[in-house]
Amino acid sequence: MSAESHFIDLPRIDLRGFTSPVQFLPRLSDELGVEVWSKRDDLGSVGLAGNKVRKLETELAQARALGATHLVTEGSRHSNATRAAAAAAAAIGMKCTLVLCHDEPKEPVGNLFLDALFGADLRLVGDTSWGELTRLTGDVVRELEAAGERVHRLPIGSATGRGAASFARAYAEAEQQMQAQGATIRTIVHASSAGSTHAGLVLGRALCRKPTRIVGVIVAGEVYDDVPGNYLRLAREAADLIAPTVHVAASDIELTEDYLGEGYGQPAAGVMEAIDLMARLEGIVVDPVYTAKAVAGIIDMARKGEIEGPVLFWHTGGYHSIFDPSRTAAVWSGLARLRGIRLTSPVEPLPTENPLPC
């Protein structure tokens, strides 16, 4: 049985409208001495970009089949998953409520601005733990159900077996694309938090019967008490849906916290260099919360001779967070080549009553 045949009965809604490409990164490859490619899941509309879109395609197909009227999910106010959920709900005409934690913003920026722009009802609950966030979201679900809504709830990061199954499909997709380019994936590296991306890729590797090394770079280690155990659970739940005879073992899960730094959304060694190299050498934006930590891992492992190419950096998106003022300021001050740029004009501005003609 081919890998593709496992996905025939996995319903999905096409939210992206195209297949994200794989792209060779020649200048980064020369810099690191290792062949590096990128799977560009960051591409798409402002709302529907990033790895969460794949998961939403399968989850919302299920929600529709169940007659849901209202999507509820939770996450950080910086969350890419919640932003994508708000955009996807808008695209299919479903109501959406987001329960958001972490520091209260001084102004509506980044993903938080987009959440509201896409029409989601925002419930900001402050700087609370992930466990407390889950409980508070349950309260919101019960409130909406009491009001007559048929709620489809997604956990943090759309981390479900169904969401993981969408990434098993994605693994097969990337293999075909690389083969068409005459390349073979030796290593996949990606940023990982709630786990269904990694779980799905591991299952996809098993379905395709490939020896690819898959490294999940942990960017939010506090989501679960047992991170590897929960990733394994998600992989097995996905297998139950699409390939019940395929076994995923604990040894199949490879994760590293070496690039987590001080925690979720906090500084980590190598992040500024990763942002700099990707932007300056390839014209690609990675963000300090998620993807830059994965790229920092690739850079470090390449320099230590601990990674085999071709390497596929799975760009899971998230560039939106770099436009949050606090993160923009951190990147600007963290890169010497930006600190030297003069932002004030040496020329007196024109009077406002005499604007330039358009």
Image (spheres, helix red, strand yellow):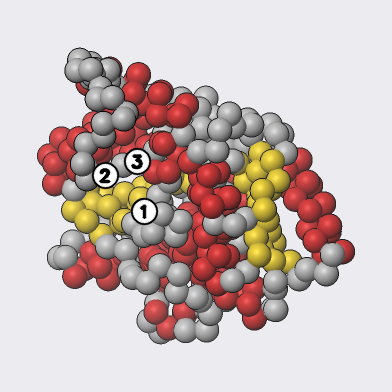
Element class at badge 2: loop
> Whole-percent x and y of residue 292?
37, 37
The residue that appears at 63% across and 30% down in the rendered structure is 103
The residue that appears at 41% across and 36% down in the rendered structure is 322
Element class at badge 1: loop
Question: Residue 42, which numbered label?
Answer: 1
Q: Mark 3 sits on what residue?
A: 286
The residue that appears at 59% across and 41% down in the rendered structure is 77
CB of mark 1 within 8 Å of CB of mark 3? no
Against 151, residue 30 (above or below) is above
Question: Looking at numbered disc 3 in the image, what kind of residue is underneath it?
Answer: Val
Q: Nearer the viewer, residue 131 or 349?
A: 349
- Residue 107 appears in the figure: yes
- Residue 206 appears in the figure: no
| Whole-number angstrom distance, CA of label 1 to CA of label 3 | 9 Å
Q: Nearer the viewer, residue 203 or 7?
A: 7
The residue that appears at 25% across and 60% down in the rendered structure is 22
Quadrant in which residue 173 is drawn: bottom left
Which comes sooner in the sequence, label 1 or label 2?
A: 1
Element class at badge 3: loop
- Give the quadrant of the N terminus: bottom left
Say whether residue 289 is left or right of residue 141.
left
Q: Nearer the viewer, residue 172 or 55?
A: 55
| Whole-number angstrom distance, CA of label 3 to CA of label 2 | 7 Å
Question: Residue 196, which numbered label?
Answer: none
CB of mark 1 within 8 Å of CB of mark 2? yes
> Whole-percent x and y of residue 358?
22, 45
Question: Residue 284, which numbered label?
Answer: 2
Which comes sooner in the sequence, label 1 or label 3?
A: 1
